[in-house]
Image: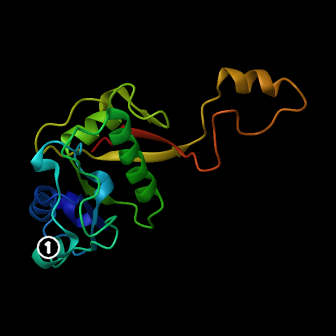
């Protein structure tokens, strides 16, 4: 009950097994908070049938306590039968999911996702805008829970930025950064 009672929002991948796991780990009797399903937390998509989600309508009819308004479409447009999604594309989806979580007003969010997308986000190289502490890089085991801290950080200086900063005409931001770039760090929370 200690972890569950502090959760202010439960977020799960749009795959049925993640929604069911979220309901078991964060039951509504303990976590009386909103529940939101997001496509961006899905497992590596494509090729494998178990990576394909049900329609939004089917999910809404089956999981009535969940909000599916954030799903990208009624049908699963992310999944393709031809090939698996690339590691970079999957890590980018996870980065977008972190940005979504960061913009939420809640501070304690329970997220139920999948081993593949988490491995691609937390691994080295992972996503270029996410710094992950060494202790948080370990691959998740099935149904493993971790408490992690997400922090927004200043972009690390690039060698070109350092050279530019020595001249009076230096711009703020650097050659590879855009206004939409948000840098994050992830580390384990000692509980």
The residue depicted at 36 percent of the width and 25 percent of the height is 124
Q: Is residue 23 above or below residue 179?
A: below
Residue 7 falls left or right of residue 124: left
The residue depicted at 67 percent of the width and 20 percent of the height is 159
Image quarter of residue 17: bottom left
The residue depicted at 16 percent of the width and 71 percent of the height is 59
x and y, in percent, of residue 46 in the image: 21, 44
Q: Is residue 158 above or below residue 12?
A: above
Looking at the rendered structure, the number of numbered marks drawn on it comes to 1
Quarter of the image with the C terminus in it? top left
Given residues 18 and 45, the one toward you in this image is 45
Q: Seen from this angle, which residue lies furthest front?
A: 82
Residue 100 falls left or right of residue 39: right
x and y, in percent, of residue 134 in the image: 35, 26
Query: What colouring does the structure picture have?
Result: rainbow
x and y, in percent, of residue 44 in the image: 24, 42
Image quarter of residue 163: top right
Of helix, strand and loop, which one carries label 1?
helix
Q: Residues within 10 Å of mark 1 (few under 14, many from 20)?
A: few
According to the picture, the residue beneath numbered tag 1 turns out to be 58
**Residue 7 appearing in the image:** no
Residue 168 falls left or right of residue 28: right
Given residues 174 and 135, the one toward you in this image is 174
**Residue 60 appearing in the image:** yes
x and y, in percent, of residue 1 in the image: 15, 62
């Amino acid at each position: 009950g200690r972890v569950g009672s502090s959760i202010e929002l439960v977020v799960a991948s749009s795959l049925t097994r993640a929604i069911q796991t979220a309901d078991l780990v964060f039951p509504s009797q303990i976590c009386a908070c909103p529940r939101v399903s997001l496509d961006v937390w899905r497992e590596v998509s494509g090729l494998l049938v178990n990576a394909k989600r049900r329609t939004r309508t089917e999910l809404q009819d089956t999981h009535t306590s969940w909000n599916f308004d954030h799903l990208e479409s009624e049908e699963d447009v992310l999944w393709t039968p031809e090939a698996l999604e690339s590691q970079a594309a999957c890590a980018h989806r996870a980065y977008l999911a972190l940005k979504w979580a960061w913009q939420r007003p809640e501070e304690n969010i329970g997220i139920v996702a999948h081993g593949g997308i988490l491995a691609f986000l937390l691994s080295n190289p992972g996503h270029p805008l996410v710094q992950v502490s060494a202790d948080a890089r370990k691959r998740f085991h099935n149904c493993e829970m971790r408490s992690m801290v997400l922090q927004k950080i200043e972009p690390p200086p690039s060698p070109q930025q350092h050279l530019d900063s020595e001249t009076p005409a230096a711009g703020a931001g650097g050659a590879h950064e855009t206004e939409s770039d948000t840098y994050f760090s992830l580390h384990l929370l000692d509980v």
